[in-house]
Image: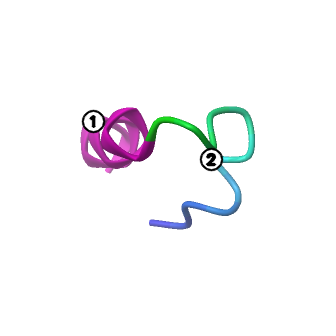
């Protein structure tokens, strides 16, 4: 899970980022 690769679009939403990574992986 790389937050830098799938989190640049939403740096202001850390929770959303974590959720996206969890759903992705």
User: Dividing the image into 4 quarters, which one contains the N terminus?
Assistant: bottom left
Query: Measured from the top left, where is residue 18 in percent x and y?
Result: 33, 48
Q: CA distance from mark 2 to mark 1?
A: 12 Å
Query: Measured from the top left, where is residue 8 in percent x and y?
Result: 74, 46
Q: Is 10 placed above or below 21 here? A: above
Give the color scheme: rainbow, by chain, secondary structure or one colour: rainbow
Q: Which mark is residue 23?
A: 1
Q: Residue at x 28, y 38 (%)?
A: 19
Q: Residue at x 42, y 47 (%)?
A: 14
Disc 2 element: loop
Q: State the residue in front, 12 or 3.
A: 12
| Side (left or right) of 5 relative to 24 | right
- Going from N to C along the chain, the mark reached first, 2 or 1, is 2
Query: Measured from the top left, where is residue 13 in percent x and y?
Result: 47, 36
Q: Residue at x 63, y 44 (%)?
A: 11
The magenta segment is 14-25
Residue 2, magenta (yes or no): no
Q: Is 3 placed above or below 24 here? A: below
Disc 1 element: helix
| Side (left or right) of 1 relative to 3 | left
Q: Which residue is mark 2?
A: 6
Number of numbered discs? 2
């Amino acid at each position: 899970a790389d937050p830098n690769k799938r989190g640049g679009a939403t740096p202001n939403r850390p929770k959303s980022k974590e959720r996206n990574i969890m759903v992705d992986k």
